[in-house]
Amino acid sequence: MFGTARRKCPATLRVFVRPRVTHRFTQEILGHPKVEVGGKYVGFIRGTKRSERLDARHEAMERLELHVVDYIDDGPRAERTPTFHRGDTEFQIQEFRRLEKRYPEIEHLGSWHSHHPNQLRNLSSGDIEGYRDTVNAQGHNHDFFFASLGTDSRGFASARHFLFVRGDRHYYELTRENLIVAEGPPDPTDPAGSAGGTVAVPDAAAQGPVPLSVPGWTDSPQGQERLARDRDLIAKYSGLRHVVRSDRIAVTGQVVWAGRVPVTLHVLYPTSAHTTDGLLKVTVAGNQTLEVSLTGDRSGDLAFALRAVESIAQCAADIHHRALHRPAGPPARGGQNGPRP
């Protein structure tokens, strides 16, 4: 399309995608090898959703976080051929409105479709024009549109990803540093909502503060003071929240260390403000996964847990770096291609 050019996304932009999304994406392609397939991404936005000026939208894009929790599938009346794809719009709108009633913050983040029958690696001019029309539509609730293109049978692993911005004649391609595949905070289950291959339960970070009422904590001045302090701390991290499970309080969720490494933590509070049976569990996603469990008087301390995250993430990053730069072993005794000793 004349006047349109693909550019690289800002290095600081982040799109978080749940593993179940990548799995469904890939299985949909494998299950339909001869026709194009796709779906509508749903999830949450952390950052400025709407701005009046294009320069402000570009600034917002640099700090933008999109959390893709699932997608609404094509629907029963979708049109699929080896060279064409169009979802069942009525079905997809109905599914989204159903989700919106339960989770007012949920957004239509974008969509994906495949070119795997012909393995074309580029968006067509029709794709580009359609995505631009969507992001510029008055009814689109935010300034951005995330689009993925499946190019072959490897599915999400080989897909390309793009961002369209309201009022911008250019569009932007994501690099590996922009895209993070990782589990988000645990969600409450809702088996009834997952029928038909559509999402029912969004990112827990969007569900707001949880009312806490746990004996040993909320009925003691020391516990109330501790919880109030932790609420203030949690407010600084959009990916963390309080939960109550089996009469135990926990803080769970995900933070991004150094702007690029997703770290999932679970801080289980002690059974009361006067006991020491808490737990800290930290998982650093990526090529190296590191889990640390600690018990004792500091294990239920959220401030301590967040300080520990930095050290643990740095350690995991160092391990990964050393693995990538490990010197090659000695040559094989039987020659360059022979067996190693």
Image: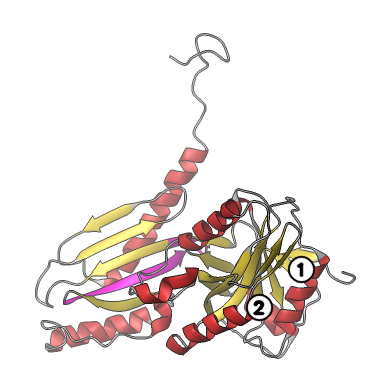
Taking the spot 59% from the left edge, 76% from the top edge, the residue there is 109
Label 1 CA crowd tier, 10 Å (few <14, some 14–19, many 20+): some
Magenta segment boundaries in residue numbering: 247-262
Label 2 CA crowd tier, 10 Å (few <14, some 14–19, many 20+): many
Badge number at residue 270: none
Q: Position of residue 317 (x, y in %)?
A: 45, 51
Q: Is residue 257 magenta?
A: yes
Q: What residue type is labelled 1?
A: Asp
Check the image and name the residue furthest to the right: 2
Q: Is mark 2 on a helix, strand or loop?
A: strand
Colouring method of the image: secondary structure
| Left or right, residue 167 beside residue 27 | right
Instruction: Give the residue pinned by disc 1.
Output: 127
Quadrant assignment for the C terminus:
top left
Instruction: Give the residue pinned by disc 2.
Output: 144
Circle 2 or circle 1, nearest the eye? 1
Q: Does the magenta stretch include residue 297?
A: no
- Examine the rendering and report whether any part of residue 267 can be seen: yes
Q: Which amino acid does label 2 sit on?
A: Phe
Taking the spot 75% from the left edge, 70% from the top edge, the residue there is 171
Quarter of the image where one finds residue 303: bottom left
Check the image and name the residue furthest to the top: 334
Q: What is the CA distance from the residue labelled 2 to the residue labelled 1?
A: 15 Å
Q: Position of residue 93 (x, y in %)?
A: 59, 83
Magenta-colored segment: predominant secondary structure: strand
Quarter of the image where one finds residue 169: bottom right
Q: Which comes sooner in the sequence, label 2 or label 1?
A: 1
